[in-house]
Structures are given as structure tokens and as C-alpha cells.
């Protein structure tokens, strides 16, 4: 049943509303700064970010960039969800606010370190950004990170898109150019290429583990 769930999530990634993939790169191929990444997210009108950054600082900067959001939700060191209101001095526990059952209009930052046990009430048409890292496997994406599974309606109305920093984008291109129907002559990526890349990374990780057992 668990394996079936993992496969289902990968198939969700291939649905048309989840096909968007972006190379997030600055001038001369450099990585984006944190602020530049948040501006890029604002440009594509997304308010859910799943990544690994400093939580409270990030949401304050994100609120300064997305001026239409009511506030931002993040996870503290106590593993609790907190709400930072626009203009508010102190954050408030999410459960103490009237928005725990409806996060429409809020920015949401999900940190991998505090993702376990999270069950936020996202709007039915919520759209999230999932950042990719070198060596990331399908299990990390679907199981350990559980990023996609935070969107309970990913298979129907909710959606994700993928942000790849320069080194990951190059890795995806390398993998997909060797795949039939791959990216020959193109640098654009979508979820089809991301899924191919995740499966390739998973196979490589399994091969490395197998070699360790053989030794």
C-alpha cells in the first residue's frame, strides 16, 4: 500500500497542472540568493514553499516581497506552526488563530526539519514550490520530505511546480538527454524530466548501497 502511494504521487507529478519546472538561476549562472528565490516565487504567484532555510527570517522577507498576503505560516524549533501577521511584532501559534482551518491568502513555508506530522488545511486550489537538490531520490521527495503529500488534493485540484538550482538543472539535462524523447536541443524542463531524474538518482543511490553491502 505504501509503495502504491509513492507511485501514485509520481503519477500526480505528471498531470498537466503539475508539469511546470523552472531553472532558478541568477546572472552568469550563479545560484539565486534567498531574496531572489522569493521574488521568483512571487512572479509565478505561488504561496507554499517547501525547502530548507531559516524559518522566521525567511517568512518576514517573503511578506515584504508578497505584499498581498495576509501573513505567513512557518514552523519553529518547538515543531509548532506559527503565524507571522503582516506588521505584527510577535508570531502567534497557528492553532490560536482563526486561520488554522483555512490558510487561503497566507504564505506557507514548510521546512524539511519540521515536516513530520504536519497536516495544514490548504485551499483546494493551492499551488506549491518544491525545490530540488543534487542526489535527491524519489523516496526523499515523496516519503522523507513528504513535501508533495502536504497537499492532500494533489491528485485532483492542488498542484506543485519544481525549482531547480543551476547544478540540479544541469544534472537533469544530463540524465534526460540520454533518455528517449529527452531534452535534445532544449534547456526547458518539466515534471516528466524531474520524475525521470528522481528515478535515476534513486537507482544510483541503491547501487551505492549495494556496493557497500558487497564490501
Image (cartoon, helix red, strand yellow):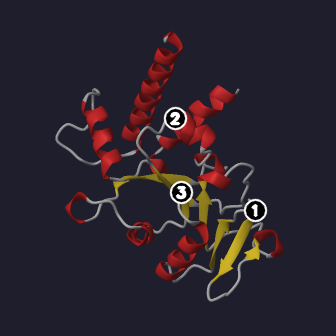
Whether residue 24 is situated above or below residue 136 in the rendered picture: below
In the rendered structure, find residue 52 and report the number of the disc placed on it. 3
Closer to the camera in the image, 68 or 59: 59
Q: Residue at 27% across / 48% down in the picture?
A: 188
Marks 3 and 1 sit apart, C-alpha to C-alpha, by 16 Å
Secondary structure state at the residue bearing disc 2: helix
Foreground label between 2 and 1: 1
On-image quarter of the N terminus: top right
Q: Residue at 31% across / 40% down in the picture?
A: 171
Q: Where in the figure is residue 105, as x and y percent of width and height?
A: 61, 74
Dot 2 or dot 1: first in sequence order is 1
Which residue is tagged 2?
A: 138
Residue furthest right as drawn: 96
Note whether residue 159 is visible.
Answer: yes
Marks 2 and 3 sit apart, C-alpha to C-alpha, by 18 Å
Q: Residue at 71% across / 78% down in the picture?
A: 91
Say whether marks 3 and 1 touch (CB < 8 Å): no
Marks 2 and 1 sit apart, C-alpha to C-alpha, by 28 Å
Closer to the camera in the image, 116 or 45: 116
Taking 15 as reference, is 185 left or right? left
Residue furthest front as drawn: 215
Taking 209 as reference, is 145 left or right? right
Dot 2 or dot 3: first in sequence order is 3
Say whether marks 2 and 1 touch (CB < 8 Å): no
Secondary structure state at the residue bearing disc 1: loop
Which residue is tagged 1?
A: 78
Secondary structure state at the residue bearing disc 3: loop
Q: Residues within 10 Å of mark 1 (few under 14, many from 20)?
A: few
Dot 3 or dot 1: first in sequence order is 3
Amino acid at each position: 500500500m505504501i509503495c502504491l502511494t509513492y507511485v501514485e504521487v509520481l503519477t500526480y507529478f505528471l498531470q498537466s497542472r503539475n508539469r511546470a519546472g523552472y531553472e532558478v538561476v541568477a546572472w552568469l549562472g550563479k545560484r539565486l540568493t534567498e531574496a531572489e528565490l522569493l521574488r521568483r516565487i512571487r512572479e509565478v504567484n505561488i504561496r507554499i514553499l517547501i525547502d530548507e532555510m531559516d524559518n522566521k527570517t525567511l517568512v518576514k522577507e517573503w511578506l515584504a516581497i508578497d505584499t498581498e498576503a495576509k501573513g505567513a505560516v512557518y514552523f519553529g524549533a518547538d515543531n509548532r506552526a506559527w503565524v507571522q501577521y503582516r506588521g505584527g511584532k510577535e508570531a502567534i501559534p497557528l492553532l490560536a488563530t482563526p486561520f488554522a482551518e483555512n490558510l487561503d491568502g497566507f504564505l506557507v513555508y514548510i521546512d524539511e526539519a519540521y515536516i513530520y506530522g504536519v497536516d495544514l488545511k490548504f485551499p483546494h486550489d493551492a499551488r506549491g514550490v518544491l525545490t530540488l537538490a543534487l542526489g535527491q531520490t524519489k523516496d526523499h521527495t515523496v516519503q522523507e520530505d513528504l513535501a508533495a503529500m502536504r497537499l492532500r488534493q494533489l491528485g485532483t485540484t492542488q498542484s506543485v511546480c519544481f525549482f531547480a538550482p543551476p547544478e540540479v538543472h544541469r544534472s537533469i539535462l544530463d540524465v534526460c538527454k540520454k533518455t528517449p524523447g529527452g531534452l535534445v536541443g532544449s534547456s526547458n524542463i518539466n515534471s516528466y524530466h524531474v520524475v525521470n531524474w528522481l528515478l535515476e538518482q534513486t537507482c544510483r543511490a541503491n547501487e551505492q548501497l549495494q556496493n557497500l553491502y558487497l564490501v
